[in-house]
Amino acid sequence: MKVFTRLEEAASFPRARAVAVGNFDGVHLGHQKILRCLVRQARRRRLFSLLLTFSPHPEKILGKGRMLMIQTLDQRLREVEKFGVDAVLVMPFGLRFSTLPPGRFLESVLVSALRARAVLVGQNFHFGRKRAGSVATLREFGQKAKAFEVCIVPPVNRDGGPVSSSRIRSLLREGNVEKAGVLLGRPYEIVGTVIPGHSLGRRIGFPTANIKAENEILPPGIYISRARLGRNWHPAVTYLGQRPTFGRGGFQVETYLLGHQGSFYGSQIAVQLLRRLRSDRKFESPAALARQIRLDVRRAEKHFAERKE
């Protein structure tokens, strides 16, 4: 899969395209449906399949940075690649681009630069200055200009409502990683680098890999998890919090690999949060914390024994 970061790069490709447009943060079940439709349309019409997405997310600029992303850009691109898309254009989004009128965006980006012959979006798609463009705007332009066909992909519904990135963000903030994983179509994953810690876990019998996480959503709590080092996945228990028992500030992400010892400093690691065990709290002593961790580990071992994950 080719990745373009400038419109000029993508425009230089000679073939006409089927283009899906959106932020695709999370690449959840709804996004996956759009990507499958994109690839089918492109193959049926012998077009080049391209996803047009944005970085940073428009809400990072227009919403003063309050919105947290479900994935890093690299995670998003890796998930998109699984669906057989030919290329992704990651367009830089800034204040100047946000003022582009809807018609100008359609004419200069989709038609002139990308030579779109089919455009696929979700039914809540909005674009252009003040989000004035809608799916109706898109359809009307495509018909009048005879430039492209428009395919509006219906949402995917799960657990009583449509799957959306905002819904998943809310679930993750609550620590409900199981339900978030259902809507994502896979477990929520944190990626980062293993860094030296204070060896507090080792002192109480549970040496952990301390992680400098790249993700923005880090729901506090203790979780049954899986950790990938290199190509191998390991059952684990993962802690996200401020270690109140030790009175040390700063948010920490630590994972204890069940039955696996070793030094992983500098290694890239991915941790999938499977199920929340409990909230973080202060214990009366490190020994009391160690007793609770032993219970957490037993529950995790039982989980993996029953599911053979």
Image (spheres, grey):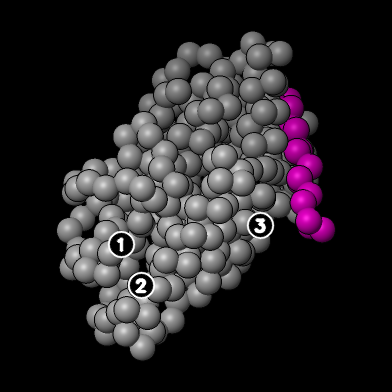
| Residue at image mark 2 | 290
Crowdedness near tag 1: few (<14), some (14–19) or many (≥20) residues, C-alpha within 10 Å:
some
Q: Could you tell me if the residues under marks 1 and 2 are in contact, i.e. CB atoms within 8 Å?
A: yes
Crowdedness near tag 3: few (<14), some (14–19) or many (≥20) residues, C-alpha within 10 Å:
some
Dot placed on the residue nearer the N-terminal end, 3 or 2: 3
Residue 55 seen from this side: no
Q: Which residues are magenta?
A: 145-161
| Residue at image mark 1 | 206
Q: Amino acid at mark 3?
A: Lys
Residue 215 seen from this side: yes
Quadrant containing the C terminus is top right
Residue pictured at 36% horizontal, 88% vertical: 284
- Residue 245 in the image: x percent, y percent? 32, 82
Residue pictured at 40% horizontal, 73% vertical: 291
What distance separates the C-alpha of mark 1 from that of mark 3?
Answer: 29 Å
- Residue 67 in the image: x percent, y percent? 49, 65
